[in-house]
Image (spheres, rainbow, N blue to C red):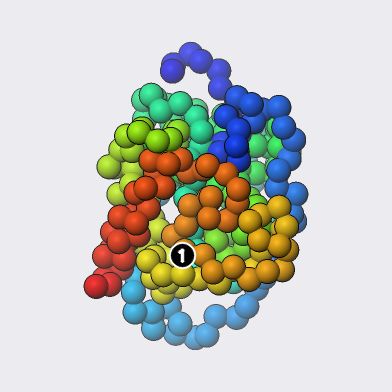
Amino acid sequence: MSGVVLLLVGCTPGLTAGAALLIGTLNTEIPVEVRRPRPVGARSALLHTAPRPRILPRSAWAQPEEGAGSRPAPRYDDKVVAVFVHHTASPNRYDCADTPRIIRALYAGQIGNRRWDDIGYNFLVDRCGTIYEGRSGGVERPVTGAHTQGFNHRTSGIAAIGTFSQGVPVPRAMTDAIAALAAWKLGLADVDPRGKVKLVSSNGQSRYQEGKTALLPALAGHNDGYMTNCPGAALTALLPSIRQKAAHLQGRK
């Protein structure tokens, strides 16, 4: 893929990455910051946490003009109780050394064609299992993303770089990294990755009417909340095993 100029927007419901370049903004909801005081000693009282995996900072891929000064301030929720897994609907055959360039292309597509204020995903994982910080705001904080229409609040978006439709192999390093990241992120709120959580839809363009409470997997696929084939049939089929591994990393039986 060296030398090829990419402009990607990431996983788009019902469209290929190329066709997605022709559409405008999909996520029009405006997240509202929610701040709630954390009880003293709450962190130490959590029973099921997992080690934080190695996460490369945003500076590993972002260019100087993509720095904090060019974006609005990040928005936050009170905590993250679910993660949504995506694929980026981009080519699979890439050298992992090219991942920063691929993420820059995704960023350019999302802020350019969709006119978002930042890349929508909170994290991105490449085929070698390397985890990158995506949306700015701090990896340990509950940053409001722009990854799942209707369910960006109290969730985190993890994007697998590639296209994982039916029959496409999903690298083990990638699924292991997704499990480790989900285990750590959900563990901050003591959420079992195998369980269900209640989320309120903020947008009627999701699978649920605006204001409706949905019971969704704590470790969900994009298609659990939105009408789309993302994260692809092959990756969707692996979500049960990813949930189980994430639970094991949290020390759950």
Q: Residue at x 57, y 29 (%)?
A: 16
Indicate left or right for 69 with 214 as reference. Answer: right
Q: Is residue 133 visible?
A: no
**Front one among 206 and 158:** 206
Indicate left or right for 142 with 175 as reference. Answer: right
**Front one among 152 and 166:** 166
* Residue 69 quadrant: top right
**Front one among 118 and 81:** 81
Residue 70 x %, y %? 70, 42
Residue 69 in the image: above or below residue 250: above
**Front one among 220 and 69:** 220
Residue 191 x %, y %? 42, 71
Identify the amino acid type marked 1.
Ala
Residue 149 x %, y %? 65, 52
Q: Give the residue number, with chain letter if any, for mark 1.
A: 218
Residue 240 in the image: above or below residue 131: below
* Residue 195 quadrant: bottom left
Residue 237 x %, y %? 37, 48
